[in-house]
Image: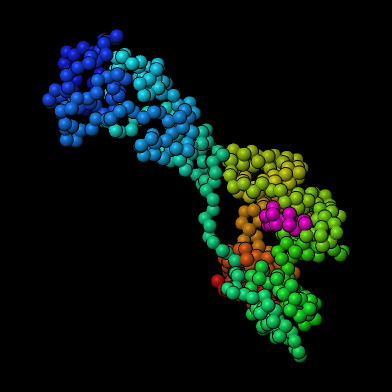
Amino acid sequence: MSYPGYPPQPGSYPPQPGAYPPQPGAYPPQPGSYPPPAGGYPPQAGGYPPQAGGYPPQPGAYPPQSGTYPPMPPSGGWGGAPGMPSIGLDNLSNPGFNASNLPGMPSGPGMGYPGGPAPGQPMPGYASGPAPGQPMPGYPKAPSPNPSMPSYPKAPSPNPSMPGYGGGAPVVPPINRGFRGTIQDYPGADPLKDVEVLRKAMKGFGTDEKAIIELLGSRSNKQRVPLLVAFKTSYGKDLIKDLKSELSGNFEKLVLAMLKTPAQFDAYEIKDAIKGAGTDEACLIEILASRSNAEIKEINQIYKTEYKKTLEEAISGDTSGHFRRLLVSLAQGSRDERENVDISLAKQDAQALYAAGENKLGTDESKFNAILCARSKPHLRAVFHEYQQMCGRDIEKSISREMSGDLESGMLAVVKCIKNTPAFFAERLHKAMKGLGTKDRTLIRIMVSRSEVDMLDIRQEYVRNYGKSLYTAISEDTSGDYKKLLLKLCGGSD
């Protein structure tokens, strides 16, 4: 078989087995002969060196290769050979690659390549290949040419309506939209100068509420909290006590809430939701369903320090039944937080929820609890989609059909928060201001806790779902200094 680019030699005999090696004193290449073929085997050890005066390379032909081919890369690896540019696959393993397994490559001791013929043996015929220097197609088990996107074997076909989900393949992370809060760090804020402003606002007859609103409404939480120590350092007085003596009503509650860290505020709200005759179950589920594992663990620590009992003990003593189990599960702060989604597992969970509810006489609440409290949020969004596809009903409607009371409200809150957290909070705000009277505690808690997280997204969901801006709704439902500071946290109208 001839090499690519070389005409076949009519009548020539193939090399005979056992042929003698080249004899010393062999003639140099004759004028007009072809240059050594690129990609051919290197000369044998002990062969006569090329003679000076050989025919120069033809224009366009590949130059003769000097020396021997570089050694193969280590077993199981890919990469550029010494002196050759990397082909970009250095870090990819290629288990099972063995040149001796390639078609047309007999095994045996090599002449530079594994599996080549023994020295002095004839070169076996090669099938017609690509031009010299071109890549060899058809290698079995070659890794994906793009090292940043490794192939995943046996992945099920992605559901077109659920882009990004694959069998074990990582989901494309959500686009980072940057900061979505309305309150940011104030450039150059100085705690000692800030407490001087607060001291002047409260000193003497009357209180300068406008100065307090302007200052606190333009500082981030990490700039507000140090004011407590700075005030005591400068004036030897307790800032909280001074504010309580000067302010009142919902404005006072809002100001004091803004001077707590997020975890301190959450622990305080949970404590307040539990104490007394009734329990604000909606507050408990709102906080525990929307916070991250790290945030919930910090709430646990602060609750134990401040109130001398664990958060779980507090919840267990004030709730009961399956609703208590739901809250206790969420209070562990141990939800899976991986971003990867395996669509086959999502289908299994959807089937399990269907079997525990719609497809069962009675309801297995513990199965809902186990899946909704332990699985990751990206995974659960896939589960909800698969559930809808499977039984033609939204998971929320199934929960409403199968459950009632606090458990129904709690499960629905978890599902809504997982599906769309800003929409969940927009609904909570709408219900707090709808109708006669305002649930100011809910309004204060959400406006303070989300002002540096996703308030811009909550505003968008509010105007989309309720036909008016959150700014307008707050303006219509509140008044005075309380309204002015809330509007600072809202950040503007949409």
Q: Residue furthest left?
A: 31
Which of these two is toward me, 248 or 442?
A: 248
Picture quadrant of residue 365: top right
Prevailing SS of the magenta stretch: helix
Placement of 452 over or under 376, stated as above or below: below
Identified at 33% across, 33% down, the residue is: 135
Displayed quadrant of residue 361 = top right
Q: Say whether residue 277 is left or right of residue 390.
A: right
Q: Is residue 87 left or right of residue 282?
A: left
List x then y, in percent, for residue 299.
75, 58
User: Would you place residue 260 above or below residue 388 in this image?
Assistant: below
- Report if residue 462 is visible in the image: no
Residue stretch rendered in magenta on the structure: 290-301
Q: Percent position (x, y) of residue 87?
A: 39, 38
Of residues 387 and 222, which is closer to you in this image? 222
Residue located 76% across and 44% down the image: 366
Quadrant including the C terminus:
bottom right
